[in-house]
Every structure is written in C-alpha cells, then in structure tokens.
Amino acid sequence: FGGGEWSPQTSQFYAAIKDLNIVQDFIRIETLSCDDVNVNHYSIRYIVDWLLEGTIHWITAHIHQGIQLQIISSHKDNPFTMDETIKQLQRLKYHPGFPNGDQLMCPVFLQDKIKYLRTLEPYNMCNATYMVERPRSSTHDIRFSKVEKDRIVAFLYNCSDEECGWVVKPPFVTCGTHFKMFQCQTKLLGHLEKFFTDDIHCIFPYTMIQPCMQNRREYKVIYIPSKQTQYIVPCGHGTSFSSKPHTRLFEFVRRAVDVFREHCPHAITDGLFRVDVFQTKLGNLVVNEFESLDAVYYCGGRDKSFHVTNFLREHWLKHLTEIDIIQDLIVKSTFEAIKEDLPTPIKNTRKKRERH
C-alpha cells in the first residue's frame, strides 16, 4: 500500500526491489494506493484483508492519509474511523512485512498525535496540549458537561501566554484538515460541540486544543538518526529564530527524538523522520508535530534531497533483506544466475570402438 507511483517512499521501495536482483518469475508485486481506495470506497478492513492475502505486506504511506474518510464511512459496514483503523492494522502483527509486530502501535505511523506529544510533555518539549475526548451521548446532538467545560476553560486561561488565541486540530489527519483558530472561548466551545456532532460516523475519538503561537515561523527539520543527517525544509512566515549552523535547533530535535524513542520503544524512527518546531514567546523550542512516511523532504539544496532519496532506497533494501522469504528468493535467484553462467556440457559424439 502506497501513496501513488509519484510518492518518494513508494518509488524508492520499487528501486530497492530492483536492487534485490530477484528473478522476475519468482516475485509479483500488487499495489493499492489511496486513490484506488477513494475511487472504490474500500474500507480499512478490505485494505488489511488485501494485505494479508500477500506473502509479504508493505506500507509506504499513512494508510488513512488522503482518504475520503467521511464518504467511505458513510457506506454500510465500511467504517474508516481512527479506532477501527488502529484495530484492523493490528491483524498484520504476525504477518511478514513492514510494519509488523509492535511497530504497528507507533503513534507517528498511526498519526495518534496526543500519544507522542505526551512522551514529550514531562520535559516541556512540546506545545501545551489539551485532549478533548468525544463526549458520550445517546443522541447525535453533542453537548459537553459543565465539568468538562470548566476544565477546557481552565486550560484556555492557563495557556494564554502567547496572547494569540488557540488552535483546535484533530489527530489522524494532516495538511490543516479541520484546523481552526479562535480568539473567543465561547466560539471555541461551540466549535468543539459542532465538530463532534457533525462527525456522525465517529471518525475522531478526540481532538486537541493548543495555544496559537505568536511567532508563526515553523522549522521543519529532516532528521535521519542513523546517518546523523539534519537539514531544514522551507517553512512558513514569521520571525526567524535560528540561523546557520542551527546548533541549538538541531540539538533540540535530536533530544526530542531520543526522548520519544526512550518512552516509545516500538516507534518507527529509523527511516525518514521530520520534526516540526516552534518557538514560544518566552524563547523555548517546542515540538509541534512528528512526521515520517509522508514527510516532505525536498529543499533548495539538491544534494541534501538527493542524499535522502538514496537513503530511502537503502533503508527499504535493508528492511527487505531482513525477511526470511526474501533471503530465500535471493539465494534461489543467485543459484539460477550461476546455472545460466555455467558452460553447456559438450556431448561426446565419438563412436565407441567396436571390440573384435
């Protein structure tokens, strides 16, 4: 399953397959993309069933990203909610491929944002975040209890240092989907109730509130721990708070990823990883988001982007060669190549001498 033929992760996965030098008759690759899912309205259960039909599964994109979640979930027995996606993906746990095992619970892979932010909270390394869980309701008209409203208001009051209001954003989506900014507490509370009321298919089990940064400049730092590679992807407007060689920024990114890995040992961080960083009004660096499979890594410096592209091919090649079935196919292909290189035995055409 991939993000389409032009996806860097998918294209480099195919390049890695080619580098294996496996005889073509020994392998067949079937691909499903988010476009296929949207056109055919496939459910998450269908996608996982399809992956399990293969000898090996491989996922090179966030399986829910770019999916028309509300349209697909509106079809009977076709839920594509966050909870259902996490549940269905666990069926791949013992199936050969990537990811499998405990990697399937990686919160960055699942885009379960509150889980990875909470690993950083005790170290004051992320933006203050309040998790607003979906209220239990017997009707579609969602209303918060007075206790929950008081808790939300207390958070808004205590997290107003930036003096720029607050943002509301759900997990499980990117690119600003359902992202809203508010200066008024009453309007924010009204939006939360409307958000869950409109989400009639219960796609989102929670949403999040964060203070809106006074400085909108966000540094998106590409970080590949195994290669000690770090560089910045062009970012948005605002006041610059880091300059070359970005020592403080890069050290913060390294520490943030180390903390995340320590508290989330099953996290997938050995591939392409991006850390999006803000600076608070008080001058503290904070993580806004982590991104992995669908992280944009192109920048002005072609050498850096080219280096990451090559790394992705090597990264997928390494993971592929760790699978027993792939190792067997490589050995079998090597044996076939050796047989083809051997000279053809010369038949003995001499007649036997007749005995007298």
Image (cartoon, rainbow, N blue to C red):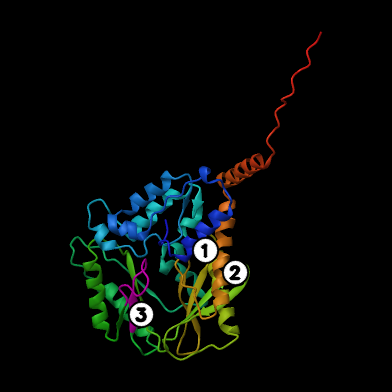
Residue 153 % position (x, y): 31, 80
Compare residues 283 and 5 and report the one nearer the observer.
Answer: 5
State the SS at label 3. helix
Other-residue count near label 3 (Cα within 10 Å), few / some / many at <14 / 14–19 / ≥20:
some
| Between marks 3 and 1 in the image, the one whose residue lies nearer the viewer | 1
> Residue at 55% across / 70% down in the picture?
308
Give the residue at mark 3. Answer: 155
Q: Is residue 190 above or below residue 9?
A: below
Alpha-carbon distance for marks 3 and 2?
A: 35 Å
Return the disc, 3 or 2, that comes first in the chain's sequence.
Answer: 3
First to last magenta residue range: 166-179
Q: Say whether residue 79 is magenta.
A: no
Compare residues 193 and 75 and report the one nearer the observer.
Answer: 75
Return the disc, 2 or 1, that comes first in the chain's sequence.
Answer: 2
Residue 142 % position (x, y): 21, 68
Give the residue at mark 2. Answer: 225
The answer to whether residue 164 is left or right of residue 356 is: left
The answer to whether residue 186 is left or right of residue 58 is: left
In the rendered structure, which amino acid carries the disc numbered 3? Phe
Q: CB atoms at circles 2 and 1 under 8 Å apart?
A: no
Other-residue count near label 2 (Cα within 10 Å), few / some / many at <14 / 14–19 / ≥20:
some
Locate the C terminus and report the quarter of the image it occupies: top right
| Between marks 3 and 2 in the image, the one whose residue lies nearer the viewer | 2
